[in-house]
Amino acid sequence: MRRIFPALLAVIGAALLASAQSPQKIRVLILTGINNHDWRATTPALREILERTGRFQVFVNEEVRGNGPETFAPYDVLLLNYNDYKQTQGPWWDERARQAMLDFVRNGKGLVSYHAANNAFWGWEEFDKLVGGTWRETAGHAPYHTYTVKIVDAEDPITRGMPASFAETDELYHQLSLQPNIHVLATAWDDAKNCWKPGEGCGTGKDEPLIWTLSYGAGRVFQTALGHDVKAMQSPGFLLTLARGTEWAATGQVTLPVPAELK
């Protein structure tokens, strides 16, 4: 990771220091340990992306079952890198841990749902409401490819100052089950000519929401469907939206600057 994108992360951190702001570091807890994606590679990548901005202190919990409100209380924001996918990867968290996550956000703190985390907890309707959009019966993606992510709200604190679009080499989730109260920040055109086989497993031929926010009780939720693997996490657009989205989820504000090189 340090050989791939340290320069951009260093620029963001330096710009934050130059802004004369020295806010207390945001405490992030990554919840992982079960995923049908390579969580052992993406978890340290997520940690490095956030910590190298200088804004976050990141911790990792690989066994959430049995945890409760006392586990989450020391943190400002939870970051889900977890996906049981119909319990094929492992069992659900127990009721106490699930309720603790809901209450954590409902009572005013933050949640980040990263990529396949929105595939988790099939049948738990409150989770669907919590993250705003989930991979359910209608969802899918065409082959991994390079596409353009378009910012559709350039005035939101998370996207303000960013370029109008950025390239992403990644999966492009489509036909997610979306809640009516999400605020979409970015979409991508899902090319109907991109198919697994001729005429099969193709893109939808429409814009698909990929990044959004929503409120849950008094708390804030940031969802990104980007970042299938470490390769996909290298784009400046992913780095910026993840870091700024995590800050917003934790605090309701964004102080992390957009480097001048990217404007």
Image (cartoon, helix red, strand yellow):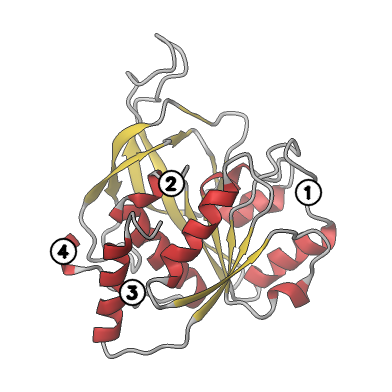
Q: Which residue is mark 3?
A: 256
Q: Is residue 263 visible?
A: no
Q: Amino acid at mark 2?
A: Leu
The N terminus appears in which quarter of the rendering? Answer: bottom left
Q: Nearer the viewer, residue 51 or 176?
A: 51
Q: Residue at x 64, y 44 (%)?
A: 35
**SS class of the residue under badge 2?**
loop
Q: Categorize mark 1 by other alpha carbons within 10 Å: few (<14), some (14-19), many (20+).
A: many
Question: Which mark, residue 261?
Answer: 4
Q: Amino acid at mark 3?
A: Leu
- Asked if the residues shown at circle 3 and circle 1 are in contact, with their CB atoms under 8 angstroms apart, the answer is no
Q: Categorize mark 2 by other alpha carbons within 10 Å: few (<14), some (14-19), many (20+).
A: many
Q: Which residue is mark 2?
A: 226
Q: Amino acid at mark 1?
A: Trp
Alpha carbon separation for disc pair 3 and 2: 20 Å
Q: Residue 14, position in %: x, y? A: 27, 78
- If you read the primary sequence from the N terminus, does the residue marked by circle 3 or circle 2 appear first? 2
- If you read the primary sequence from the N terminus, does the residue marked by circle 1 or circle 4 appear first? 1
The C terminus appears in which quarter of the rendering? Answer: bottom left
